[in-house]
Amino acid sequence: MEYVIQKDAKIAVLCGGMSSEREVSLRSGKNVHAALQRLGYKNARIVDVSPNIMEDLKGFEYAYNTLHGKYGEDGCIQGILEILKIPYTGCGVMASAICMNKEYTKRILSTVKEIPLIKSVFVKKGEDVKKAVEDLNYPLITKPVSEGSSFGMTKVNKPEELEDAYKEAVKFNDDVLIEEFIDGFFVTVGVLEKEGKAFATEILEIRTKTEWYDFDAKYTKGLSEFIVPATGLSARATEEVKKIAVLAHETAGCSGVSRIDFMIKDDKPYFLEINTNPGMTDTSDLPAQSKVMGIDYDHLVLMILNSAGLNK
């Protein structure tokens, strides 16, 4: 039986926050709040998360989490909500903490042979970055290990560019993940749950006007073309991506909602990362993926809302 939150419930739409993704989160929160109002949840309120969050949450019965990045997607806000006994949307403390860290996500998923991972190295603060990448083939992608929205990411075409790219990444995190660049195209697939059972959305293929899927391509209208359902994959690869997405969601202990990103080269998928709190802006992937399945924005919000408190 599906869990249903009553229309008179007091719901805090958590957004904003203190991460580098604050502005994106505010956009997600505004959209979700408007949808809840349309759905009849008149006691839903936007809460811009600050260090006073425990005080700000007094009186609320549920939390709809639209925070992205540090403190909102890494288990921190989830832990506070657990202490306050406020049911919340999305993944729980453990899955949020694991998936926020790209390296530890890969370590968990490496235990499942069916999930194809990109060759990479993990560079901790103080280590020699040039020595660390000796066994990798250029081009490379440098990534802060716990960051989203492509902040701090750089494509490194040759060794001479590595040091500057590494310095850009450590502006955001002390630790850096460096992967071989897959010269293919980007796809992403949402994972939702109904009555506790995970299922994949349609796959969204993204063709960008930038060199790769960077921040500008993600959040500037006109810089990316969304193709959904994806057309660049064979029927076999399409089913494989969906299967791997659900497997990754379950292996990492995710619940409620997630979005799994892949690169595709020669019709083969390569896992990139798990997003435990996918964006809900006008240009976000999950709403577009769901829409082609007959799940419009408001019903997507309702589905995620009703996952609050389940499987944490």
Image (tube, grey):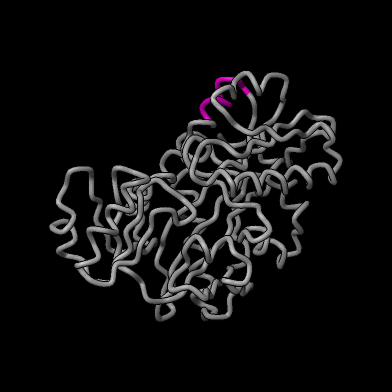
Residue at image point 71% right, 68% down: 292
Looking at the rendering, in which quadrant would you find the C terminus?
Answer: top right
Q: Nearer the viewer, residue 186 or 214?
A: 214
Q: Position of residue 180 (x, y in %)?
A: 29, 67
Asked if residue 264 is among those painted magenta in the image, a careful observer would answer no
Q: Main secondary structure of the magenta part?
A: helix
Residue at image point 30% right, 62% down: 179
Asked if residue 83 is among those painted magenta in the image, a careful observer would answer yes
The magenta stretch is 78-85
Left or right of 21, for residue 114: left
Looking at the rendering, in which quadrant would you find the N terminus?
Answer: top right
Vertical placement of residue 148 versus 266, above or below: above
Vertical placement of residue 211 versus 162, above or below: below
Q: Nearer the viewer, residue 258 or 214?
A: 214
Q: Position of residue 161 (x, y in %)?
A: 24, 65
Vertical placement of residue 9 versus 102, above or below: above
Residue at image point 50% right, 58% down: 260
